Image (cartoon, rainbow, N blue to C red):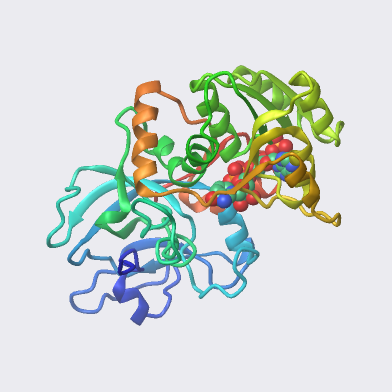
């Protein structure tokens, strides 16, 4: 399949110098310069800049979306800090996840029409089936410009209609965090009712995993660095929780909670610093869905545990458009309410990122469209 990279930055902006907001502009003939966007000219939250760029127009096979809301993922923070890909081509418009309305379509587009409410897909080229190197290229806010702009041009194949019961703020939380949790539980772990899932922390992926697992009839155990957040998770259905700061060897607690068996599924977001505990916490023959990279460890990986316990370790990288559409059908049926921590105004992006960096949030942080 030929990779599609249609979610490119506005074409004219490439040829034009960055225009700082508030500077007085004289539009070249035929070009309107009204689009507002956040850009990363060099890494660091303090270096983020608001730019005014040429208005984008959809070409054949593309759609123009007015962005109403964007949600932040830990990955967006890493992108801005330069940890995600220090060699990333800059300037880059950050953020993979946004929701908005289609306002124009290019020639030949039939999947959506003006007036449809949509999200962009995280990986613009992964439509269906198994992942491949071609399909996972073209990630919004990473390989190509992202959603933190008044308008974006996306490939018509790279959008998904949003469930009708969700607001733009809520829908903006779906493309990465929700789909990753869905893919981990439904496709990687093939979760069934009555099984026990362990979530880690109370961020975007983990709270969606809690909500999906409860909707599927599972028992959910969880860790957090905050007792207050554990109490909030209980209100969402968490069956039992443990504070990983006061109980750093929390795997023992998980085993105790499961009659000595261990959890059927671990939604692993901690990374190197939690992986050994996750292997101790999972049951023999259980599944560790490896998703996150939140912590480091100087300890070697306990490889023998994987083979002795015959653990399925499955890496997860968000998911395909088909999985996104499948998840949306489940959301519609179950009327799951996305958990939004706080909504920031467009100009407050640096504050929103700092809230995530400080780990103060519970669920998803949203930044409203400009
Ligand atoms: N592979 C993929 O496709 C994919 C997709 C999405 C996210 N991710 C990765 O998954 C991770 C979570 O992403 P996110 O967007 O959900 O992040 P997030 O919303 O920022 O949530 C992170 C939360 O994890 C908890 N946490 C932090 N350090 C921890 C540790 N050492 N052990 C256990 N919990 C810890 C904290 O919750 P408490 O305050 O409750 O402790 C923190 O708020 C990140 O590493 C991200 O890059 C990967």
Residue projecting furthest to the left: 108
| 187 over 105 or under it: above or below | above
Q: Quadrant of the N terminus?
A: bottom left
Q: Residue at x 77, y 18 (%)?
A: 259
| 82 over 66 or under it: above or below | below
- Residue 201 at x, y = what percent? 69, 36
- Residue 2 at x, y = what percent? 30, 69
- Residue 153 at x, y = what percent? 29, 61
Task: Kindly indicate the quadrant of the structure image that contains residue 147.
Answer: bottom left
- Residue 16 at x, y = what percent? 36, 80
Q: Residue at x 45, y 26 (%)?
A: 337
Q: Nearer the viewer, residue 140 or 150?
A: 140
Q: Note whether residue 170 is visible.
A: yes
Would residue 206 appear left or right of 126 to someone viewing this image? right
Q: How many marks?
A: 0
Q: Nearer the viewer, residue 188 or 209?
A: 188
Q: Residue at x 58, y 75 (%)?
A: 87
Q: Residue at x 71, y 34 (%)?
A: 282
Task: Kindly indicate the quadrant of the structure image that contains residue 44.
Answer: bottom right
Would residue 151 appear left or right of 86 to someone viewing this image? left
Q: Note whether residue 274 is visible.
A: no
Q: Nearer the viewer, residue 105 or 308?
A: 308
Q: Quadrant of ligand 1?
A: top right
């Amino acid at each position: 399949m030929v990779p599609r990279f249609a979610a490119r930055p506005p074409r004219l902006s490439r040829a034009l110098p960055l225009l700082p907001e508030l500077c007085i502009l004289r539009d070249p003939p035929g070009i309107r310069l009204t689009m507002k966007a956040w850009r990363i000219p060099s890494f660091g939250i303090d270096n983020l800049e608001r730019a005014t760029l040429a208005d984008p127009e959809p070409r054949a096979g593309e759609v123009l979306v007015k962005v109403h809301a964007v949600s932040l993922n830990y990955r967006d923070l890493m992108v801005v800090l330069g940890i995600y890909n220090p060699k990333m081509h800059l300037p880059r418009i950050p953020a993979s996840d946004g929701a908005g309305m289609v306002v124009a379509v290019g020639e030949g587009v039939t999947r959506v029409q003006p007036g449809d409410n949509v999200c962009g897909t995280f990986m613009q080229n992964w439509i269906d089936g198994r992942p491949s190197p071609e399909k996972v290229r073209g990630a919004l806010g990473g390989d190509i410009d992202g959603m933190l702009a008044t308008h974006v041009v996306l490939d018509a194949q790279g959008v998904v209609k949003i469930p009708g019961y969700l607001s733009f703020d809520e829908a903006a939380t779906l493309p990465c965090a929700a789909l990753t949790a869905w893919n981990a539980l439904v496709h990687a772990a093939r979760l069934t009712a009555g099984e026990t899932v362990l979530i880690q922390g109370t961020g975007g992926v983990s709270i969606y995993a809690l909500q999906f697992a409860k909707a599927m009839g599972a028992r959910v155990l969880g860790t957090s660095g905050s007792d207050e957040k554990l109490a909030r998770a209980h209100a969402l259905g968490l069956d039992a929780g443990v504070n990983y700061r006061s109980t750093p060897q929390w795997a023992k607690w998980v085993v105790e909670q499961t009659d000595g068996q261990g959890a059927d599924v671990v939604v692993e977001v901690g990374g190197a610093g939690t992986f050994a505990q996750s292997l101790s916490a999972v049951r023999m023959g259980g599944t560790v869905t490896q998703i996150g990279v939140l912590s480091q460890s100087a300890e070697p990986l306990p490889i023998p545990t994987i083979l002795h316990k015959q653990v399925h370790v499955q890496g997860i990288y968000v998911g395909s458009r088909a999985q996104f559409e499948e998840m949306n059908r489940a959301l519609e049926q179950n009327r799951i309410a996305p958990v939004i921590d706080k909504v920031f105004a467009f100009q407050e992006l640096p504050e929103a990122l700092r809230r995530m960096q400080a780990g103060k949030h519970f669920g998803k942080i949203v930044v409203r469209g400009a």
